[in-house]
Structures are given as C-alpha cells and as structure tokens.
Image (cartoon, grey):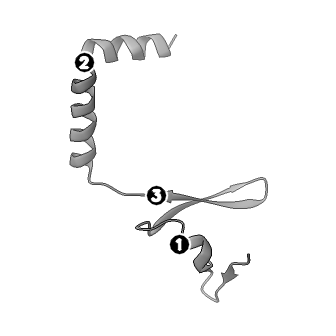
Amino acid sequence: MLAKKTSKNQLTLPKEIAGNFPGIDLFDATIEENRIVLTPVKITPITVSLAGVRAKLKKLGITSEDVVEAVEWARK
C-alpha cells in the first residue's frame, strides 16, 4: 500500500492501515535501515499511570525495598 506525502510533508495513511489502530491518533516516527517506522502511542496523564503502577506493585506484593534491590542488581 502507498502512503502519500502532502505538500506540507504530512503522510496520509491508507484507511486499511489506520483502521488497525482504533482510538490511536499519535504515532512515534523513527528511521530504521532507511525505513520510516511508525509506532502507535497512547498518552495518559502521569497521575493516572503512576497510580496504576503503584496499584499493580501493591497487588503483586512488590515493596520499595524490592525495587531498590532490583535497581542495584541491574546496575551490576
């Protein structure tokens, strides 16, 4: 499938491709081996994501000491 570049250097994605990403309006664009790679991005407020992470850590029984130990281990 072809994507057309407009006079303002914007790409128009074919409906068949864009339709695979419902609810996604943003893509991270990078270049890999002379190719444009688009990765879907979903933005969430930082307070929501931090609360979610903290809740998941608590549910899994992971303590702040566990995190400190994991960071120390990873830095070795």
Evaluate if marks 2 and 1 touch, with contact meaning CB atoms under 8 Å apart: no
Kind of residue indicated by mark 2 = Gly
Residue density around tag 1, few if under 14, some if 14–19, many if 20 or more, within 10 Å: few
In the rendered image, the vertical position of residue 20 relative to residue 32, given as above or below: below
Residue 75: x, y in percent? 49, 15
Evaluate if marks 3 and 1 touch, with contact meaning CB atoms under 8 Å apart: no
The number of numbered discs placed on residues in the rendered structure image is 3
Q: Nearer the viewer, mark 3 or mark 1?
A: 1
Secondary structure category for the residue under label 1? loop
Kind of residue indicated by mark 1 = Gly
Question: On the rendered image, what quadrant is the N terminus found in?
Answer: bottom right
Q: Which disc, if any, is residue 61? A: 2
In the rendered image, the vertical position of residue 47 relative to residue 26, given as above or below: above
Kind of residue indicated by mark 3 = Val
Residue density around tag 3, few if under 14, some if 14–19, many if 20 or more, within 10 Å: few
Mark 2 or 3 closer to N-term?
Answer: 3
Q: CA distance from mark 2 to mark 1?
A: 39 Å
Secondary structure category for the residue under label 2? loop
Q: Which disc, if any, is residue 19? A: 1
Residue 71 is drawn in which quadrant? top left
Secondary structure category for the residue under label 3? strand
From the viewer's side, name the closer residue of 30 and 1: 1
Residue 4 is drawn in which quadrant? bottom right
Residue 58 seen from this side: yes
